[in-house]
Image (cartoon, rainbow, N blue to C red):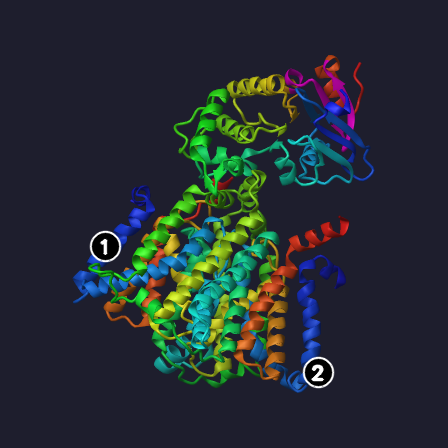
Amino acid sequence: MSRWLAGRAYLRLAAALFVVLLAVNIALNPVRFAPASLGVTIGLASGLILAAIASMPPILAGRGGIDISVGPLMGLVNVVVVRWLVEGLGIESPFLIVPLVLLLGLLSGALNGLLATVLRIQPIVATLGTSLFYAGITLTIVPSPAGTVPAWIKALAGPTSILPLAAVALLWLLIKRLPFYEQLLCVGSDDRAAYTAGIPVTLVRFLAYVLAGLIAAVGGLCLTGLIGSADPNIAGTYTLLAISAVALGGVSLAGGRGGLVAAVLGAADIFLLQTALTFFNVSTFVLQIVYGTVLTVAVVLNADRLRQLLRRRRHA
Amino acid sequence: MSAALARIPRPVAALLLALAIHLIGMALIRGFGTMFGIRAMLVLATLLAIAAIGQTLVIIIGGIDLSIPFVIGFANVTAAQLYGDGVPFAVVLPLVLLVAMAIGALNGLVSASLAIHPLIVTLGTGTALQGAVQLWTAGFPTGAAPSYVTSFVSIGGSIGPIPVPWLIPAFLVLAALVILALGRTVYGRRLYALGSNPRAAQLALVDPVRTWTITFALSAGFAALTGVLLLGFSGAAYARVGEPYLFQTIAAVVIGGTTLIGGRGGYLGTIAGALCLIELTTVLVGLGLKPPLVQATLGVTIVALVAIYGREAHVRELI
Amino acid sequence: MTEKRAILTARGVRLAPGASPIDFAIGPGEIVGLAGLEGHGQDMFIQALCGLHRPEAGEIRLQGKDGHVVQVTEFAKAAAQGLAYLPRDRRTTGVLGGLSVFDNFAIAALPDHQRLGIVDRPRLKEKLAHFTRELGMVYRSPSASIGTLSGGNQQKVLLARWLAREPRVMLMNDPTRGVDLGTRMKLYEVFRRLAADQGIPLVILSSEIEEILQLCHRVLVFREAGLFAELERDAMTMDRVIAAMFGQEAA
């Protein structure tokens, strides 16, 4: 275990924070973290965790890859499920809803992938465009919070909350066994070298975005369970939180470095921070200050250059 | 077709596009081409263009500034609150600008000296700033701008016989200064050098940390200026008034021909891009689209425009 | 050559822990070559001389423009005192792609050719014209993109970039790599003139022994991060240099 961690020095900050924050949270609110209510607690965090995991593949792919449409996609899934599927078409069965949600995720991921890798529009611009598009569509479908969700979706925020997370984790572990994952990390570290080595750079990057869309859609389903209705305004903050989580986990925006644990740890840290602060009844404004500060401080502390600078100062 | 389009200088192409959209608007919407409508668009485009000065500089150097909307909100609310509390405007304006520039300088300093992507740094500081401002005003900002600021930006304003507010000629001077600075000053040339090849620029004695710090400070400064002008424009303070400017400043810069890779482009293109965006937004609103759909359509259009013009190079071209 | 006349000196420089210390000095008008098999320390050494790489031990001193002797620890500071460095691989470390010939030329000389922050274009254009003649550069116009120039001409622009600063000493890392034969000959001519007529000492790292034999007054051959041999003009033969590169004395 320690050897595994030693090979991943970038996780140190997030791991240390996790231990501290978990201890603080358990001390403040032991009921929340008792085994009986773990389901609910995980249900509160699952949307964020999945948003963070979803943000990873495009970032790993390097050369400015990023997907800031993760949050808006989750919101879109939310309103599509409630307004169109449940209310509109009367579909309630998980065997229909889940595949449809996954399909939506795949399609939107493919759209981002098409724009960012095939058409080679800068990923920040492409995903900014799609995020505006999804946000706009979401607000058009459901201008203000409404609707209800079937019981099984609500359960995703409670007893069955571990299921989507386990499914995504399983998927990720399976993908890690495929050559695709190695190729993804190669492309992220040095795309020129990867190209000359024969790796299909464009395809690998495209699939990264598809994967992001898929996982984000699952996150959208969990979010739907958490909200219990269609709310076009909630998903907005998820993008910022997801990127903060990823940064906190030590993932480099330049690509090639990072993984599932980084995203999960970072997201868990943010969730625990959130929970600890809300225990003290701080206003949403204070929370916002904290998020922004955490993001900035996290990237500063995780910066390789910082270590170099400090080392140089010590030797001087 | 795309190659032929690419040969037209981008600022010109963007201007032609703005004109085309205007003509479409005149054809589809009754009452579109009125004098008042044109003046309104000019003022809105000017405000966007001022906010986009910083984004232009930052993108040329190879970065991006996501704190612009938050700084706009900060300046908007802080100026209103302070002036409303009785602080003279001659103190309020420089104070707000200085604080904003300090924050911008921090962004640039951290990004350059620690080699962190400015996307994250500016997102972090901007979010924290907005939270702090809203906390200070308890979410309900009060105050307004002095009347001379309001008339400075007023759509109905005029300078003698010319039916434009003082904002417009003042902006033309500012724009000329920016274009001159980019083309003729040591700072401007260093900006392009760093954007083009940071390693080579550094070996050619360009100090990246200093240039990045100055650039992000300037970006925040112009964003703050926009925030104060918006206060005169809308009459009431609003912490989230800058939100549309995140997307719009990036879009204006990119449509105008300055690619996100850095080292290319210029401010003239941004001005044309700003005109394009405001024309487009006005037409969409005039067609009766609700704000969310306007947003969605803008997203699609920007992506389409960049797909035609501003695509990145394939990996094989980088070897 | 006495220490007093030396413009750039290195004393006790260790490139790696346990490597033997290197002493070096170069005075006006000298052309010194750095040779060795790839990765044996000559690249590290030339970068240490510029202040781009901090050696394990040792001191490097430069006699600056104002006559004072300063220690070389940071590249920018050394450059301010008249040190010039033409890096290897112009594509990644030299050429500012997308910018014009003029911009690529003027970039390092900007601080000395400006008034209140505004670039003194006429003076710089004059200098560019001067170097265009001196170095035999070929390009469409100063505002043409640097990408339209041949590799050889690009290298000349980069050389001119540093010459425009009127350097005290020039360090060049494989300056004729990827350059056509005609340009190469021209560059040799320029190098010889710089040393002989203007007295500017040149340190040239080269992977071509022929080049070193043609240009240099002496050569430092590196082996295993240390100086294996320093050969003077009379002793410089192809055999001796190659042998030294492999760590052997030649007959």
Q: Please state the horizontal and vertical placement of residue B283, each as a whole percent of the image.
A: 25, 64
> Is residue C213 one of those drawn in magenta?
yes
Q: Closest to the observer: B28 or C192?
A: C192
Q: Is residue A73 visible?
A: no
Mark number displayed over residue A184: none
Label 2, secondary structure: give it.
helix
Give the label, 1 or 2, closer to the camera. 1
Amino acid type of disc 2? Answer: Ala
Q: Please state the horizontal and vertical placement of residue C66, each as a whole percent of the image.
A: 65, 32
Q: In which quarter of the image is the N terminus of chain A?
A: bottom right
Kindly indicate whether the residues beneath marks 1 and 2 are on one polypeptide chain: no
Q: Name the residue under label 1.
A: B20
Q: Is residue B76 above or below residue C54?
A: below
Magenta-highlighted residues: C212-233
Q: Please state the horizontal and vertical placement of residue B13, each as a whole percent of the image.
A: 29, 48
Q: In this view, does C208 lie above or below A86?
A: above
Q: Name the residue under label 2.
A: A27
The chain holding disc 2 is A
Q: Closest to the observer: A158 or C138?
A: C138
Q: Which residue is drawn at 73% across and 32% down?
A: C40
